[in-house]
Amino acid sequence: MSDGTGNTPTEKAQDGQTAADEGPRFSPAMIATLVAVPVMVIAGFITYAALHFSADDTPPSPVESYTTTAADAARCAEFIKKLPDELGDFEGKSVDGTTVRWTRADSDPVVVRCGVERPHELAPTSSLQVINPVQWFITDTIEGRGQAYVSVDHRPYVAVWVPAGAGNAPITDVSALIEKNLQRAPLDFGR
């Protein structure tokens, strides 16, 4: 029996062709569509991620929400002038009122805020960190992002946000400037 091509099924089998080899054929337009749609979806996800998770979308540090007191504005202005342009490997000092930020490409910024209120959680049994020789009270810790400290033995109170991976240089440098430029004061437990 012939299939119209002059080849019998035996001759086709000898040529290495079978009926299964003659499956449905897709048009070039269909193939292009099947390739283009997944590529466009992947490109869309990459674009969304790049725009949605840019450095400008970094959530604010806790110290940026701490209340400041107007009474300390003049002393804070003098202190802020003495802060360096770089803290460790953070640079690009920017000042916004009593808040100062230094940035690094792969990290949250280091943030210093002068004139914050006394931490309400500070108590006689609170654990304090002594750095260069300023006493710091840890007010906030965000896993994977960093820690917030408030200097509690100088006035005005100064808060510092140290992002994860920043090392000791930022808080060590700020401590030295606090010790040199701000008035020592006794610990105030709010009694």
Image: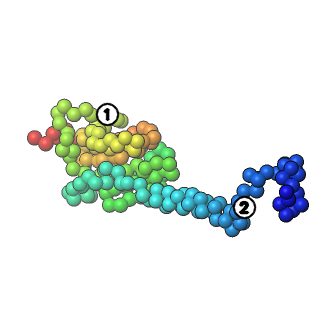
Taking the spot 69% from the left edge, 68% from the top edge, the residue there is 29
**Camera sees residue 177:** no
Q: Residue at x 27, y 39 (%)?
A: 137
Question: What x and y, as percent, mark residue 26?
Answer: 70, 63
Nearer the observer: mark 2 or 1; the answer is 2
Secondary structure beneath dot 1 equals strand
| Nearer to the camera, 159 or 121 | 121
State the quadrant of the C terminus.
Answer: top left
Residue at the (30%, 47%) spot, across then down: 159
Give the answer, above or below, for where 56 lies relative to 143.
Answer: below
Which residue is located at x 72 percent, y 66 percent?
28
Which circle marks residue 9 in the picture? none
Q: Quadrant of the N terminus?
A: bottom right
Q: Residues within 10 Å of mark 2 (few under 14, many from 20)?
A: few
Which circle marks residue 130 in the picture?
A: 1
Q: Which residue is mark 2?
A: 25
Residue 140: x percent and y percent? 30, 43
The spot of residue 110 in percent (x, y) is: 40, 49
Callout 2 secondary element: loop
What type is the residue that disc 2 sits on? Arg
* Position in image of residue 153 (x %, y %): 24, 40
Q: Is residue 70 left or right of residue 105?
A: left
The alpha-carbon separation of the residues under discs 2 and 1 comes to: 76 Å
Of residues 92 and 7, the one nearer the viewer is 7
Query: Would you call the spot at circle 1 few (<14 residues within 10 Å), some (14-19), or many (20 or more)?
Result: few
Looking at marks 2 and 1 on the same chain, the residue that comes earlier in the sequence is marked by 2
Residue 141 occupies quadrant: top left
Q: Is residue 121 visible?
A: yes
- Look at label 1 and name its amino acid: Val
Q: Quadrant of residue 132?
A: top left
**Along the horizontal axis of the image, is 55 left or right of 140?**
right
Image height of 79 relative to 168, above or below: below
